Amino acid sequence: MLTTINCSMRATEIKIKFRSRIRYILHLVEEWFRDTCKKIRSSCKISLKTPPRLQALRNRETGTGSTIRCYALQLAVDKTTTFSQNIDNFIQCTKEGKEASPHVVMRNMRQFMSGMKNYLVKHGEREFEKEVEKERLKLKPNEFLNLDAILEGVMMGLVVRPLKEHVYRLFVDHYTATGSLRTLADSIQYAYGKHIQELGVRPKLFPPSEANLEIILKYIDRLQKADSPLDKLENLLAAISAIFNSVKQSNSDSEIVLGADDLLPLLVWVLVRGRVWGAEVEAEYMWGLLHPSLLTGEGGYYLTTLSSAVHVLKTFKSSQGTMSTLNGSGTPDCSSVLRILIPDELHGSLNTRTLPVRPNNNTREICRILAHKIRCTNPQDYGLFKLVQGEETLLGDHECPQELSHCVFAYKRIDAKIAWPKTSS
């Protein structure tokens, strides 16, 4: 009897030490992240706002909800729980499986993570529901628990990190077989010796200085080394911010205004100078594993810009080593960007937006990015049209505008009655 009591006390003591150790580790991670952010801010002022969803996921280790995250990690460590067993089985089956497509594997990972989050929220396990209830009681009237964001961070660590090496190996095999890796590497090497204006950067626009380029490439390097697609996206946004800020600094004595048309060729130049051979793998890794809600705003726009830059580079050598242009600008052709007319109904004028696109972007995805860029509050009322000699045709959700030729594109209210000019420049 006495032995049983001693064993029970010993087990309780171990659990207490285990929980305190996890909390201590989380505390160290929190301090490390705070110090890292301070260093980043001191080296380069970030002008882009972090997307709200990304910020919510970034805060997953601190503040409200940290005990829920801690408990979910405990469930994962305890090999007797359904939560832990399912994760271990999925990782093992994924590594041992014969699926060769990295995109299919990432889709399965994304679905599995969503399923496990739903399992904990709807059914819970052990004391999970009680931990959530404890945190709910601490909420102020204007606060809520973002369980999706908290558990997203947990699943990134438990599922994505152990499978990163496997996914990367599949990417290397896939892109080696298709020749994409060799194409991108050859194009980067070829473009390295070209003048910056041959990469599409317009004349009189001074690129980032060597010192600022080094800062930008540090963000790119961090992006490549990170396990989590969330961390990769954060470093991509930091690199984009550094590009904008450094170009503004380099052109402070001139009246040049850096526009969206300038970002794509500048990013191409950065990838060339940094010899970022794995840019396509990094972009696809983020596309496949990021939470879909992160791909609808700033995050999705700048990730699309990265994919567009990769596409420009892959076709650079075959296009005789210079950017083909639209309307005399340094913007590449519409396989990597779209120029879209947007009517100003109040003033009766046409505005033009240049949008970076991926080769497989469909109309629905392009409309979503456009609605975000022009801050459209009723995107359901708008559509993308193709114009041929002033005659408009509404494009279907799953059509790919980049594959269409001899037409102009316009984004407008579906019900708006507009007489278009016969020719559009």
Image (cartoon, grey):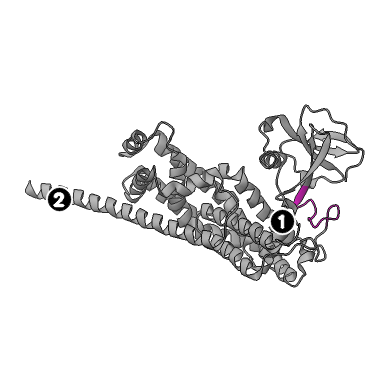
User: How far separated are the C-alphas under marks 1 and 2?
Assistant: 64 Å
Q: Which residues are magenta?
A: 325-338
Left or right: 58 in relation to 266: left
Question: In the structure shown, which secondary structural element does the residue marked by tag 1 occupy?
Answer: helix
Q: Is residue 416 left or right of residue 113?
A: right
Mark 1 or 2, nearer chain start:
2
Indicate the quadrant where residue 409 lies: top right
Amino acid type indicated by mark 1: Leu
The chief SS type of the magenta part is: loop
Q: Residues within 10 Å of mark 2 (few under 14, many from 20)?
A: few
Q: What is the secondary structure assignment of the residue under circle 2?
A: helix
Q: State the image coordinates of residue 199 (x, y, percent, origin top left).
A: 76, 63
Circle 2 residue: 7
- Front-lying residue, 241 or 220: 241
Q: Residue at x 34, y 51 (%)?
A: 77
Residue placed farthest to the front in the image? 253
